[in-house]
């Protein structure tokens, strides 16, 4: 009898491992195409800032309808939800963040700080696209402290700030990191956001990273909801948002490295109270950002024509060609 129980226990353990295995089938490392757009042409109705706020490690079912997230659920009811959204099947967190800015993970499947074997030579990521096209950008990271933080400290984690993994931002020269002024000017502490909001100096593209407590990674859903409730209304009151801006609020991945995180599009141009069932992924999100900014479309994606932007979330076309004469 004891032997039978041991065998049954082993089978159950194997089954559980199989059910909770991480899906890294999207792992991609391809060469990016050179950038071609040197002057951005943004679509009519989209002259505001494109904001992205990324939270952590929760499935849609853990957020939508959760009484601990009243603010997020109010945003969902008033704006557009991508109900069919999934990540690009790479884990843990870091590769998902890299994908948000480049359309692939460059073979990165870890959460390590930038290092000799954990840095990316691409010069076609979203920051490169934005600058080449004559636009502006900035990443705001909570509790980073000094700009251009390449090392984890307290509740600050570089793994959630994808820009610091690219050589042309972190200054990796093959033997050491020597960050250029570009990094300190564009990758800054979250505290700088309030001043930029107050002064009306927000750039065209903003990437916001809460710390490990406020993004629900270590903290609770209620804590993350309260943090968003303090931030999002201040953005919504700004001209950068009201004049054709958008806030993409998304989670990097589901709980336990699942693939079904929440995704909201918050905008004066969003379809209010709408839930899409289209199967979108992180490449679709990035293409949507690129369309709104008028920059190169998915230069690091091997088959860009196979990706569709998240058009059905909005009442205003996402590209100049779609807007018509």
Image: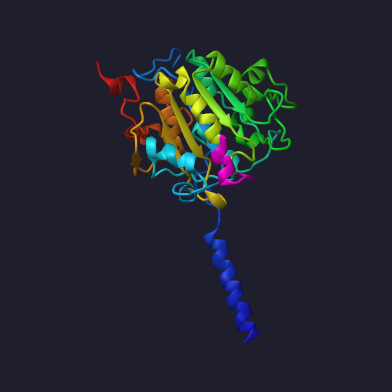
In this rendering, position of residue 58 left or right of residue 287:
right
Which residues are drawn in magenta? 217-227
Residue in the foreground of this view, choosing between 267 and 120: 267
- Residue 263 drawn at (x, y percent): 45, 39
- Residue 264 drawn at (x, y percent): 43, 37
> In the figure, 62 relative to 50: above or below?
below
**Quadrant location of the N terminus in the rendered image:** bottom right
Residue 77, image quadrant: top left
**Quadrant location of the C terminus in the rendered image:** top left
Residue in the foreground of this view, choosing between 199 and 316: 199
* Residue 107 lies in the magenta stretch: no
Residue in the foreground of this view, choosing between 105 and 220: 220
In this rendering, position of residue 290 left or right of residue 191:
left
- Residue 90 drawn at (x, y percent): 53, 44
The answer to whether residue 108 of the structure is visible from this angle is: no
> In the figure, 321 relative to 5: above or below?
above
- Residue 201 drawn at (x, y percent): 54, 14
- Number of numbered tags placed on the structure image: 0
Residue 182, image quadrant: top right
Residue in the foreground of this view, choosing between 318 and 176: 318
């Amino acid at each position: 009898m004891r032997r039978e129980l041991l065998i049954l226990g082993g089978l159950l353990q194997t089954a559980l491992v199989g059910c909770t295995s991480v899906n890294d089938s999207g792992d991609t490392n391809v060469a990016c195409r050179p950038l071609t757009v040197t002057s951005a042409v943004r679509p009519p109705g989209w002259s505001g800032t494109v904001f992205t706020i990324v939270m952590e490690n929760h499935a849609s079912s853990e957020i939508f309808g959760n009484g601990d997230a009243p603010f997020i659920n109010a945003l969902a009811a008033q704006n557009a939800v991508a109900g069919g959204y999934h990540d690009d099947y790479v884990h843990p967190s870091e590769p998902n963040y890299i994908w948000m800015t480049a359309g692939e993970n460059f073979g990165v499947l870890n959460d390590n700080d930038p290092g000799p074997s954990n840095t990316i030579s691409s010069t076609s990521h979203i920051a490169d696209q934005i600058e080449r096209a004559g636009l502006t950008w900035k990443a705001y990271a909570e509790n980073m402290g000094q700009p251009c933080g390449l090392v984890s400290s307290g509740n600050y984690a570089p793994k959630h700030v994808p820009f610091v993994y690219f050589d042309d931002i972190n200054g990796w020269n093959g033997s050491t990191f020597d960050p250029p002024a570009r990094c300190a000017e564009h990758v800054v502490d979250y505290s700088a956001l309030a001043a930029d909001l107050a002064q009306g100096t927000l750039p065209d593209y903003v990437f916001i990273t809460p710390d490990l407590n406020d993004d629900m990674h270590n903290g609770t859903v209620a804590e993350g909801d309260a943090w968003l409730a303090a931030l999002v209304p201040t953005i919504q009151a700004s001209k950068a948002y009201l004049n054709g801006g958008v806030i993409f609020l998304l989670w990097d991945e589901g709980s336990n490295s699942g693939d079904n995180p929440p995704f909201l599009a918050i905008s004066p141009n969003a379809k209010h109270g709408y839930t899409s069932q289209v199967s979108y992924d992180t490449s679709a999100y990035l293409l949507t950002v690129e369309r709104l900014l008028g920059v190169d479309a998915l230069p690091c994606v091997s088959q860009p024509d196979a990706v569709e932007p998240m058009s059905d979330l909005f009442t205003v076309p996402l590209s100049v060609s779609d807007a018509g004469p």
